Amino acid sequence: MTEPSSDIAAHIAELRRVIGYHGYRYQVLDDPVISDAAYDTMVRELMELEQAYPELKTADSPTNRVGGAPLERFEKVIHPTPMLSLDNAFSPAEVLAWYERVTRLLPAPAAPGEAMQTDHTDFVVEPKIDGLSISLLYQDGVLVRGATRGDGYTGEDVTSNLRTIPAIPLHVPLDPQAPLAAPPLLEVRGEIFLPIDAFNTLNAQRQAQGEKLYANPRNTAAGAVRQLDPAITASRPLTFIAYYIGVTPNQGLSIPLRSQWEVLQTLRTLGFPTNATNRLCSTIEEAIQAAQEFFRLRQSLNYQADGAVIKVNSLALQQELGIVGRAPRWAIAYKPPSEEAVTRLERIAVNVGRTGVLTPFAILEPVRISGVTVTNATLHNEDYIRDKDIRAGDWVVVKRAGEVIPQVLGPIIERRPPEGLPEWHMPTHCPVCGEPVERDPAEAATYCVNDQCPAQLVRLVEHFAGRGAMDVEGLGEKLAAQLVGTGLVHNVADIYRLTKEDLLPLEGFAEKKAVACLAGIEVSKTRPLARLIYALGIRHVGSTIAELLASQFVSLEALMAASEVDLQHIGGLGPKIAHSIAAYASREANREVIAALKAAGVLSSAVSPVQPAASNALDGLSFVITGTLPTLSRQAATDLIKSHGGRVGDAVSKKTDYLLAGEQAGSKLDKAHRLGVPILDEADLRALIQQRSAG
Ligand code: IVH
């Protein structure tokens, strides 16, 4: 045996330290600074070194661990059995090598006709969703505890957050008459994730509001699950896919489980979502092929997957193979080839958003990355470009993960020409209107502050007319550009002055479409105050803040008259938002728009102001409110119910008398349905009040 040199010992110690640090950033902070691929490479190197020099392996090596320590904020939970990690394979040859290890450890396959269950040529291939693994515990059929993985042995109790995720069943059938009854104690594990389209929508909203963008769906999901306030978790469209049953699954289960494939079928029958792309394969070659097919399919899916998991199908064989270190021997994560490519950055251009925020992006020499030709990639902001030292003319690494927008990760400095390349700076003038730009000292963002800038105006009109705002049927990106480009619209109030004669000459317009469009514009005049406030596109005022403002001010005029100090006193408004609203209101051009909106007949007051202490018609009744109501803000509805003696709670339970539901109601509505809680809309509520005060 070779004696390890002190150099190797030092290198191993350094690797452990670096891996430990990055594990902490990923597991505990949800803020990794290196790619998963780079992390995996280091862990592999450490494992190889520890294998070559077993005397240098220590009990506290990160290869013994599954992840980092849990955060302190939630109650700790000890997992009934550890939540394991997986070893990786990066090529078919490595998968075959794993298979050979498996075969060596197992008895020869049984002769045909004998115990079929020991046939280890059966595999299940499952997508490896890049989310957040969790454990769910059902006691007597009811979800009693949900926990994160944490370090694999101890996780965090996030039950109330997990209960907000619609894909997670709150109970499972226990009735022996049901097609399949669960045991009195059932543990289910799986992955929580944020679908890519939801992630993109969330980031688009944040960009429009000049807020910092989330890095990727995985961290966003992890952040949402670790919110102390379950309402925030509920507001993120998280979902779940199950792949594992723990805690002696056969105990009490009405059908015994023999294989992973049966586990997946059983999970489905019990009400857990499983992945439609799971495959049962009868040879390892077939399994490799199924995984590779999945890699090709990956780009078209609505979730991020960082590989495929190949599992030995038989549970008896799984048991026999057991666990080594941090991972089971019976499964392997097969990772696809890289999604990164190197190309030349030809030029850095700048895009102007609705709030005037300037976003630099790269114009690239076209390059194919996992089957798609990429010509543009985001560069985020000026600081990102400076920190990474990215310059036009550089060879750069471009990554295209599941997200729609590819990213420039950084330059390859060694390939920069010896004479160097010029540094890039944000333009001092808006690339569209030519007016000087301003950098917000508090943020990384630079803004075009000219509210006449056509680029901003197109995006503002699009936002104003968008869903969640004034929701004008037929007024999207294309028409917004046409209206601004032809000079028909100089501000959002001009929309309400459009006539059929204005629209007919526009490309793609005929009588019918023009009439429909004008009808859509007319209908939008009656949107509730919160929608109107949101539609104005005031920086940092998203839909939630707009709701809050609508609950505090009787009209848009009242809001515009409020001083910055008044605004700062409203709970939930930070100084940044208060300043932004006051700055908006102080601009003459904005005040004119608001006056014009009112003159055009857009409702700018909260409808049906609440009468205090109206009656005791709702005495003793408890309500929960969900979704967007047609005229009442959340606060106004609460006030209305309370003024008639009712109570308003946060969560639906068997004790809830009524759920007051509006548009885009989510999990509360599902829960009310399940518990048989009657559901009212706003009109029903008014009718109920009338009926009970009359009677
Ligand atoms: S099996 C007992 N199946 O990958 C083996 N894991 O690197 C571990 N993952 O912590 C679980 N999809 O978060 C398994 N279909 C799948 C998976 C999956 C994603 C994650 C899971 C686990 C990690 C291991």
Image (tube, rainbow, N blue to C red):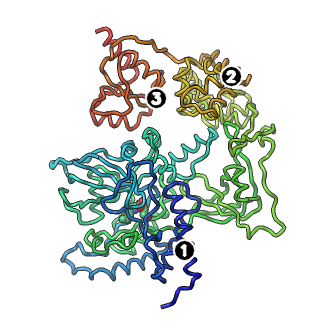
- 23, above or below 452, in the image: below
Residue positioned most to the right: 419
- Pick whichever, 662 or 31, lies toward us: 31
Cβ–Cβ under 8 Å for marks 3 and 1: no
Q: CA distance from mark 3 to mark 2?
A: 26 Å
Q: CA distance from mark 1 to mark 2?
A: 65 Å
Residue at the disc numbered 2: 593
Cβ–Cβ under 8 Å for marks 1 and 2: no
Residue type at tag 2: Val
- Pick whichever, 580 or 266, lies toward us: 580
How many other residues sit within 10 Å of disc 1, few (<14), some (14-19) or many (≥20)? some
- Pick whichever, 103 or 302, lies toward us: 103
Quadrant containing the C terminus in the rendered view: top left
Residue at the disc numbered 1: 13
Residue at the disc numbered 3: 628
How many other residues sit within 10 Å of disc 2, few (<14), some (14-19) or many (≥20)? some
Instruction: Say which element carries label 3.
Output: loop
Residue positioned most to the left: 177
Mark 3 vs 2, N-terminal side: 2
Q: Is residue 138 left or right of residue 36?
A: left
Q: Does the rendering let one see residue 127? A: no
Residue 543 lies in quadrant: top right
The location of residue 689, given as percent across then percent down, is: 35, 15
- 296, above or below 460, in the image: below
Mark 3 vs 1, N-terminal side: 1
The location of residue 526, given as percent across then percent down, is: 53, 20
